Amino acid sequence: MKLYCLSGHTTLPCNVLKFRSTTIMLDCGLATTSTLNFLPLPLVQSPRLSSLPGWSLKDGNAFLDKELKECSGHVFVDSVPEFCLPETELIDLSTVDVILISNYHCMMALPYITEHTGFMGTVYATEPTVQIVRLLMEELVNFTERVPKAQSASLWKNKDIQRLLPSLKDAVEVSTWRRCYTMQEVNSALSKIQLVGYSQKIELFGAVQVTPLSSGYALGSSNWIIQSHYEKVSYVSGSSLLTTHPQPMAQASLKNSDVLILTGLTQIPTANPDGMVGEFCSNLALTVRNGGNALVPCYPSGVIYDLLERLYQYIDSAGLSSIPFYFISPVANSSLEFSQIFAEWLCHNKQTKVYLPEPRFPHAELIQTNKLKHYPSIHGDFSNDFRQPCVVFTGHPSLRFGDVVHFMELWGKPDFSYLEALAPYQPLAMKCIYCPIDTRMNFIQVSKLLKEVQPLHVVCPEQYTQPPPAQSHRMDLMVDCQPPAMSYLRAEVLALPFKRRNEKIEIMPELADWLVPMEIKPGISLATVSAVLHTKDNKHVLQPPPRPAQPTGGKKRKRASDDIPDCKVQKPLLSGSIPVDQSVQTLERHGFSDIKVEDIAKGHIVLLREAETLIQIEEDSTHIICDDDEVLRVRLRDLVLKFLQKF
Amino acid sequence: MDPECARLLPALCAVLADPRQPVADDTCLEKLLDWFKAVTEAGSSLLLLQENPCLVELLFHVRKPQDLSSRILSFALRLAGTFAAQEDCFQYLQQGELLPGLFGEQGPLGAAAWAAPTVRSGWIQGLHSLAQHPSALLFLADSGAVDTIFSLQGDPSLFVASAAGQLLVHVLDLAMRGPAEGRGPAEGRGRLQARDWPACARRIVCHLEDCLCSEATPRVTQALHVLTTAFRHCHGLWTQGLWVQLSPLVARLLEKDPVPAPHALVELLLSVARSSVPSSDPGLWETVAQTLSHLSPMQAGPLAAGILKLQDCPQALRIQAFGVLLRPLACVLEAAAQAPGTPGLLEGAAGDQMAVDTLPPSKSACVGLLCSTLAHLELLQPLPQRPSPWPQAPLLAAAVTILRFCNGSAAPSSELGGHLCAMLVGCVRVQRAALDFLGILSQGLGPRELVTQVFAVLLEYLVSPDSSPTVLKKAFQATLRWLLGSAVPPGCCDLEPRAQLVLRELLAVLQKRLCSPCWEVRDSGLEFLTQMTRRWGGQASFRQALLASEVPKLASQLLQDPESYVRASAVAAAGQLSSRGLLAAPSSPEHPAGPQNTSFEELLLVLTTDSEGFPRRAAMRVFTEWLRDGHVAVAEDQERFVARVLQAASGDLDWEVRVQGLELALVFLQQLLGARGPGAAPPCALAQALRALCRVQLFEFAFRSLFDCDRPVAQKSCDLLLFLRAKAAPSGSLQEAGDSPDVAPVEAALQRWRAGEQGQPLGELAPEAVLAVLRSMDLEALRDTLAESSDHVERSPQSLLQDMLATVGVLGDNEADCY
């Protein structure tokens, strides 16, 4: 069993598991962090961005100034943003049989894999995952396509040049970075997905059974159990134990795993989501009360549902009832509506609302009362309705494309500096409050989970096996288990530490009918069987041996005994061990004398000097060695056999 | 006993003795027993039994083996004990062999009823009451009761076991008191030699010795508990002898590993140390010192804290005890130290090894140790006998370090530090304990850089989104204490420059916290604001900083908060801000007056319209304070202010608001007539005052409140009117001035109110009529009636007996109905 690690990103994993002759890809996350190296794509021509100075080498050489721009000491590529794909060279991706998807964030690289690698298999994902990922992909394509860039930079990818660039020199495999896929590729990729439901058992070639389980993180998010009859691998990716909108995490089925692959833990283990939501609300209220606007860069699905719900409960008490909330995304409408229809994938509390005349999520009420308005983009209706102060939810969180870029330009006039994402907007006037809300499991929850489900081995990204570099003393911020977890890095291949020992074989009922078990020890019965082993699709079946040709003209009605296969009379099978002392006594009683017993490494030798014969008794064999005296041999054999059980 | 009770008693005894009758509930039996106790304490039990033979019959009756409920049996045992507490009555009952039948082996002891814990408990309590005289001792010895008590110490019911231990101490005390007290002063009252102890005492002491030597920890624990009770409650000199006798055995417990029953041992040593023993046996201190060094830090902590609270004990021991208490904190400091050799809490601390020995490896134990250590030190800090010199600076450093471990901001370099950090990070319990402790430490100052660290860590907690509401509240409290403590020079009210810097950051945090979605956080933020304003509202630097922030505006917005507790705190904050002139509410078109008047209208709106009691109560408190301190809104037109508030308060459904209304009325009265104290007001002032009181309709409110269905309101009103009458009494000038006033309408209204017709208004009042009515009323009698608790009628023994009989009677009727 091997694990090929194609992504180094902990929350956007892409691993391939080879298990019992199947090749299973676990997630295909797309790292969007690469886009941070690019200049934002403004929806409206931005004089500021277009007038940024070109970057020149220290020696004044400015041959790259068309491709690279400088802003507050950072260098940005002035081109269409590109994404860093999972490794494609480590393993031939056309051999991948299936791709199992854990949640919609972890499959954004799917079109790259299904459309460009010769992939012939099937993708398994739950229905909400597929519907929402379609929205996310549609949004991504829309964001990048609607503002076409005149130029496409490529010079900067040259390795020699790259080494000279301050911020890009650590970037991974720039040469493999790709532009965003097209809608056509998205549709083709999504058509390869087969929908599954929680706890549904899916057979892969008869060798392996895979089952998705609720992981509690997002609508339709799943962990996967991959098992054969005697081995079990759990894939835990992006799970949450908090009570938010999705169905709670199913933990019990993860028990007794041989290997547990653990990925997608919270990215900010020091920030408790509850505290962060509180922080978010307080800052939002404070800003808006002072006449300011709040911009919330976010994905069009997921935490935004919980945020809107929390704000719904909060706005009246905070005196914000008159403040408009805008949700701007090409898929805003679909996202808000989809969330209401996936009742069976929601937490218990929301499921019960199915039977009540009220919507599952309170954002429906916000929309009805005109407090929350949604628009496909800043153009059109939005520009008519727009009024300040307001709260705007929009994407993309990377701040490199999407409507968010416009608001960054609109409100972010000069003053002080902040995070990497904000680098091209420097200097910035907006106050930046970083309230990351990541509901995925933290390390304390992981320790509890591992104690609970007790896997034999844990496999996880290397980042989880040591405290974060910035907080090296925080020994609590790492996966703590016994035996220590095995770790992987991008482009590594791990041999997982277990061997297959057993295989399950089925016996046909007709054959089973003939078996006559004999109890040889209390609780253990044995029976002999002669059969044909039939193996197909990794399933092994014992079938009755072919019958010899029936004598023609026989009776039409066969007697039951006729069914017994016509085999040779078999010698009985023997079991047990031969007690040396007793057998010597027996031999003496039967007239043999001058018997000597010698101990050898594997057992004993009984020497019948008078008869010039020796009996060699070992753990798994007994030999009688005599000179052509068949009568003596048979006599000795019968004496020895008396000590053994026969059936 | 009053005749009516005596008449009812036989019927009641018959009911109790009848197993077919359902037993009255336990509380009735308890009340009955209390009553009998009171009766026997007031008079002779013997007489009582002779006059009411039904009682003896009842006791005889329960002796017979029958299907009597265990509660009745237990009751009878306790009743018998109560009677037998008097020696003549004891003899009387002995004559009939009643007592052996109840408490001896013929009694419930051997019967099935003994299985019920309540019977065993009744048996013990009966004997406890009974054992008051020498005859009782003989009885105990003869009846074999002492052995039973020994065995009951290990009873599965904890109540029974504990009562058995207490009974043992009581018997021991009774036995020992006799001989010791019998001696004359010349013989040296006091320590008897063990061999001279009475037989009964010797048996008990022997039993205790056996237990102390036992290998079974429960038996050791029992003995230690008994001894603890003895030293805690018995003050006879014999206790010194007892300690001399048993202390070697106690000391021997320390030789065992692990030490059995460490908590009970600590309790015992502390109770001995607090008794008169130390004056006669200095050896005690040696045992204590050994115990301190033998027990683990968790076990020794309470002992160390107890020793340090003692007024009188050897200095060396105090130093040792303080060392034990400080050790966990010293380890924390050690673990956080960046480099070895940083000055710690304890000199000569052995570094990592000590830490490993001190700090338990498991999270819960470590958290428990730190919390209890911090709590002990917190209690110790304000005591005059606290150790001196008090290591203020290292303790501050330790508290700050713990808080940094808890929020993950400490960066220890050692492995131990890393381990500690992983255990403490996010631990709310330790955070709360450390913040409390830090608050207490504000009473002593510290080195400048440490105080800076204190403020820094407090701000970290206040800013952190991860601080839980309870932790945040503690952080606010500690911050306030430190701000109070950092005034320079001590006693000066202005904030020192550093605190002023902190204040700016603090107000920024407060701003955010007042917008928190969590109501507890908004509430503690407002409380903090109120207290800060109360303290520094007059200081220019504070005023400037506060007015420059959004805080006052946010506070007044919170008057509309959906949570009533928050509204109440917002009312208090707005009241305080307004009285300091800090409420910068812009004058709206509805309220063209200044901001201070606007705030009066706003709070009055709360008082008249808020659906919850808390904000209305808070508004009343604010108004009373304003009246007392002369708020701007009051100064403009005091009478109008009082009239409007009283009008709103008088109609309130919440009795606390009405009481507050009367309090405000009292303040108004005092301002008109002079504060409390003897002496009438000058006649002209009185006349003027009375007219003012009539104008604000104070009398209607006060008279009406006299008949309020809530007693505290009526009491308060009574006090108010008594105060007024005292001020007016000697003068009488008003009455003489004119004709006798027409009091009929007032009295008619009072009559109606008394009858419960509260809707009737009083109408216009003349001051003379008020005074006349006031004088004619028997306010003292009313006050006395109100002072009695509301159930004083129902609590009489007669009512109790009637109730018990009635219960049976009612049930009897039902029985008849069934057939």
Image (tube, coloured by chain):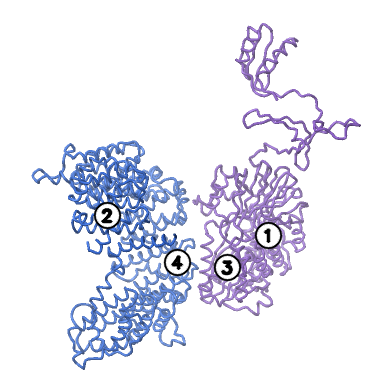
Chain colours: A purple, B blue
Quickly name the residue at label 4: B520
Q: Amino acid at mark 4?
A: Glu
SS under mark 3: helix
Q: Rounded to the nearest whole Å, what is the CA distance between mark 4 and mark 2?
A: 36 Å
Q: Rounded to the nearest whole Å, what is the CA distance between mark 2 and mark 3?
A: 54 Å
Q: Rounded to the nearest whole Å, what is the CA distance between mark 1 and mark 4?
A: 38 Å
| Residue nearest the observer in this picture, B95 or A107 | B95
Which of the two labelled residues, at mark 4 and mark 2, occupies the earlier sequence position? 2
The image quarter in which residue B202 lies = top left
SS under mark 2: loop
Quickly name the residue at label 1: A129
Which of the two labelled residues, at mark 1 and mark 3, occupies the earlier sequence position? 1
Quickly name the residue at label 3: A309
Q: Rounded to the nearest whole Å, what is the CA distance between mark 1 and mark 3?
A: 21 Å
**Discs 2 and 1 carry the same chain letter:** no
Tell me the tag on residue B386.
2
Q: Is residue B761 left or right of residue A444?
A: left
Spot occupied by residue B671 in the image (x, y as percentages of width and height): 26, 82
Q: Chain of mark 2?
A: B
Q: Amino acid at mark 3?
A: Glu
Q: Are marks 4 and 3 in contact (CB under 8 Å)?
A: no
The image quarter in which residue B139 lies = top left
Q: Is residue A174 visible?
A: no
Q: Chain of mark 4?
A: B
* Foreground tag (2 vs 1): 1
**Discs 2 and 3 carry the same chain letter:** no
Q: Is residue B25 left or right of residue A225?
A: left
SS under mark 1: helix
Q: Amino acid at mark 2?
A: Arg
Q: Chain of mark 1?
A: A
